[in-house]
Amino acid sequence: MTSPAAQNSDLLLARIAEALERLSPPPPENPDFSEAHAFVWRAESQKLVAVRKVSRVELGLLRGVDFLRDQLLGNTERFARGLPANNVLLWGARGMGKSSLVKAAHADVNARLSGSPEFAGLKLIEIHREDIETLPVLMGLLRDAPYPFIIFCDDLSFDGGDASYKSLKAALEGGVEGRPANVLFYATSNRRHLLPRDMMDNERSTAINPGEAVEEKVSLSDRFGLWLGFHKCSQDDYLGMVFAYAQHYRLEAHAEQIRAEALEWAITRASRSGRAAWQYIQDLAGRLGQKLD
């Protein structure tokens, strides 16, 4: 016969076990990848949320980046076909369509390969910068799925004292398992090496071996086999973007009006870029009472 003290002890242990189970995160659920072509990774719940309608610009509307577009399309299509391909870092001037190009290339490759035999669809998964440390968990969910995946992080960069870049390095190439064969990582950044110069300069000045310290930081960008650099556009390229949008959406305004207003718009923002062109078009469409459908 069990003594009252032993019963109380067993009851206490059971309560402790239940409390620990409530505190521990639930195991990640296996998502249904067939329900969408794009997903967002929610690290707090370790779930992939399907995106029914991706916010994207048509590939043909991205002007002034023809060489970069072809490079990214070629890499993405090879990967979708099961051929070797590289992780991609799109870096450089803000507002020049880095993230728009990733989403447009994903849609374009899916559209062109949709009728190919044995092509199940290329999936795009967005991970937020602050969730990079959970990248190994996400890759574990994707490893055995029958689809190719592009994990996409927009505006990726690291600041001083932030050590999560080491998790990214290990997930991309390091570790015993390595990166799953059906996963590529695409990232956009304003920084070529993803780290601020003062952070690397500080490492150089305080390290016992300055060269090795800086090499540790710079080696992160080496995990990306394909670097695509975006630079500020010329006035002709900027106007080309504006008129391409205006024609696509059939905005009813005179060409000289559009040209003059678009140049003034760029001057007031001290920026000629694809983002500035799109913002002007939104303003023009609103003033004309036309919707951008």
Image (spheres, rainbow, N blue to C red):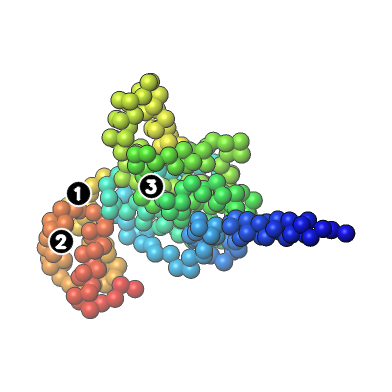
Residue of label 2? 265
**Residue at the (31%, 38%) spot, across then down:** 196
**Residue 2 position by quadrant:** bottom right
Q: Residue at x 12, y 60 (%)?
A: 264
SS at badge 3: loop
- Measuring 20% from the left and 57% from the top, which residue is drawn there? 239
* Image: 237 above or below 210: below
Q: Of the numbered discs in the image, which one, if any, rests on residue 234?
A: 1
Where, by quadrant of the figure, is residue 259 drawn?
bottom left
Please provide percent x and percent y for residue 201: 29, 30
Kind of residue indicated by mark 3: Leu
Which quarter of the rendering shows the N terminus?
Answer: bottom right
Cα distance in 3D space between marks 1 and 2: 15 Å
Query: Sequence order check: which comes first, mark 1 or mark 2?
Result: 1
Q: Give the residue type at disc 2.
A: Trp
Q: Quadrant of the C terminus?
A: bottom left
Q: Are marks 2 and 3 in contact (CB under 8 Å)?
A: no
